[in-house]
Amino acid sequence: MDLVTVKGLSKRYGGIVALSEATFSARAGEVHALLGENGAGKSTFIQILSGAVKHDGGSILVDGTDYRPANPDAAQALGIAAVFQELSLIPDLSVEQNIWFRHEPRTLLRTVNRGEMRRKTLALLEKYDFPALRPDQELRRLTLAERQIVEIAKGLAKDPRILILDEATSALPAREAEWLLKLTRQLAAEGRLVIFISHRMAEVRAIADRLTIFRNGSTVAAHEANAVSDNEIVTQMIGRHLDRLYPERVATATDCIALRVKNFSSGSRLSQVDFALREGEVLGVGGLQGHGQRELFQALFGASKASGSIELWGKPTLINNPRQALTGKDGIALVPEDRRGQGLLLTKSVRENLTLSVIKRFTENGLLSRQKEAALVKEMVDFLRIKAGTSEQLAGTLSGGNQQKVIFGKMLLTQARVLLLYDPTRGVDVGTKGEIFQLMRDLAAKGYAILFHSSDMPELVHVADRVMVMRNGGIAAALEGDHISEEGILRAAMLETRVA
Amino acid sequence: MSAAERPLEMAQRPAEEKQARPGIDWRGRLLDRAPFLVACLMLALIVAIYGSLQSGVFTLDEINLDTAAAMTLMLAATGQTIVLVRGGIDLSIGGMISLGTVIAATRFTDDPSTTALWTLIILALGFLIGALNGLLISLLKLQPFLVTLATWSILNGVAMIILPTDGGSIPVWWVGFASAQLFGLTSPVWMLLALLLFWWWFRATRVGITIQAAGSNEKSAFLSGVSITRVNLVTYGLSGLFAAGAALFLVTQTGAGSPTIGKDYILPSVAAAVIGGVSLFGGRGHLAGTLIGAFVLTLIGNLVFVLHVSSYWQPVASGVILLLSVLASSVAEKAARNRVQ
């Protein structure tokens, strides 16, 4: 019998239909993938399942009984836990406090039993072979990837019958993502149902028993995973054929050097990074996570300090803060890693987000020209095909892909021609991913110089003209042409790491 | 045999794993506590100066006196600390303190049972008014600053209606409570210890952790199943309760009620917490720091007195110390952040 049966599920937010007549069924002991573009209704669906949101219509049966949790607590009490993409962790609590938050073992005085909590934490981490985590470390000291791992531990701590993983691999570097896939299989083997959401087809392929496809707020199909091809899946997801995810790679690099970095060092995290990024080039930055990629991008943008020299378009330049980086037509702009936290003002409109850094561009005689502003905004919205009701829609209410487009727009409006893209497709749906890659190639063809980091290796392989592989804060290798392959990148990233 | 050995096994196993877990992050811990340590340093400095100018500073009598002088602020600041850790602020404690003193001054009698009854009523009123603050903040989705500013004004007005000018009377035996001694320590010192004990317990309970969590990241807390309304209710309720407690202690010092006295504790309660390392952004801070902060602010008054300068220098000195504290925590915060990147 099915563990979960969903019929005719619907949910509206004001006038917007988020979910209509969705159906779903899944068995205990399987990995069930949910596929669909951002905004297709997957998020709403799992929010309902996890008790964060209440549905308007339709029915959910869990184990044959009607299921309508009042809140996430009630859902967890019924054995349903979610690992959210929007992390539910508390920055000022320790790793173990987060894992057991509100379910802490207690002493007779009703205080938290620390010894017992430590014991349970270590037992949990060991049982599922977690990557190294320090239970006593405060969460705000952890990287995004480590936080995602804590979030997973927190979900498992509830010992759920049904575990929902929402884009859990998108923040993880390759090795940890692989661990998670193994873990997912292990959980299914223990008789749990794992509902797995990922935009990475290869992962879905690797672990899903069955899959359900969402489009425009409804379910369009459910398949046994081995009975359907990638092409069919993608076609059903987007409702049309996606010719190619990756655009054709036309060499547009000129001999003109846009950005030259010499002897760039910052403590132990960056050591003597040297490279040149040419006009019209997409230069990939790869390697295992935590080997200096983040620091390199941050330092180039002036968000953190580094020694060494930078030349922009042949001129030595000092960049001590983002304001200097963004100055003038020869500046540097960054698409940051944490879209919602660093890139966008979620409670401000698309327009305000786009023009935040460039108020000067539509100021006349010291006054803002609304007309000029509107023209610039319209140009960007059209150019990037941002899907928003109006340019006054709040950025926080856009889908992930459209939020990312707004950040691109904000960056392009600064007129900087050296672009730093740090994992720009993280948590973005397939359709928008394709658009972003095409955009990158178009910008390169227009003479922009692009430094591009992705945690998804195939993206580097298929989009970048050259790939620099970072290891221990330095450049371990620069791959060109046919040498750019997942194997080549991994080889450079890992081989000598093992010796060290 | 095996039972005795098991804990050892547990402790050793992680170290043997493929990736050794690093040891305790001492530098990080030190940086986390930097604001608190700075507050301790300040207090030590002030005590040293004070002690060199005035004889008899390092005696039990002086500790008893200073604690009594600081206790009203300490009680008010305890409530404020809970609210600040929640990520809010409570201005209404000023109104609650005034209201508490005027009710006490008009209702307390020499009959202990009447007085006890009104003590309970004042405390209950404090909790209920505080809880109402929390409810308004949650239900109307308003800024704590605005809601508590409004309730402060309302409570102030009510206090004025009950007792338009300073006065009324407090039973002598109630006033005497503040100088009651046990083992050479007066009741305020015991209250200080009780406050620390309360905090040690409170911060380890689920309620305490939940309040901290809601202050650290409200959305994450909500997603983890926390009822934000309930958190606000308890947080502001406790703040009101401690403000009522502050009023009940204050009348032992003044012997009368005052409809305006409460305002003197609003900003100092916040300042004491900030000097002690409590973050205004929520999620971080401990009562020990706040109590040190309250001592710092109180002793500055003493220092100004023994230096024989105008008492108007006291707020100036308090402000400078507040700035220095904020500076210290921001420097530590930056250092901590740089280490993460």
Image (cartoon, grey):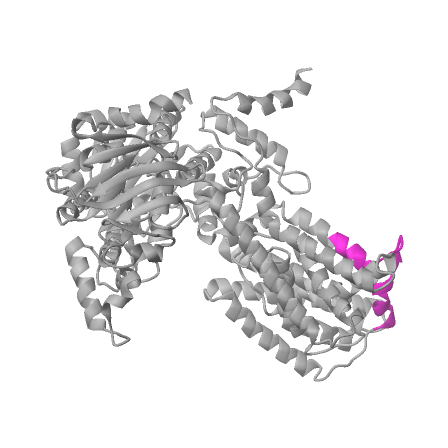
In the rendered image, residue B191 lying in the magenta stretch gets the answer yes
In front of the other: A289 or B116: A289
Q: Residue at x 28, y 38 (%)?
A: A275
The picture places residue A481, in percent across and down from the top left corner, at: 16, 30
Q: Is residue B114 visible?
A: yes
The picture places residue A452, in percent across and down from the top left corner, at: 26, 41
Q: Which residues are magenta?
A: B171-194
The N terminus of chain B lies in quadrant = top right
Quarter location, residue A383: bottom left
In front of the other: B145 or B337: B337
The picture places residue A154, in percent across and down from the top left corner, at: 47, 37
Q: Residue at x 33, y 48 (%)?
A: A336
The picture places residue B337, in percent across and down from the top left corner, at: 48, 47
Q: Is residue A90 visible?
A: no
The C terminus of chain B lies in quadrant = top left
Prevailing secondary structure class for the magenta stretch in the rendered image:
helix
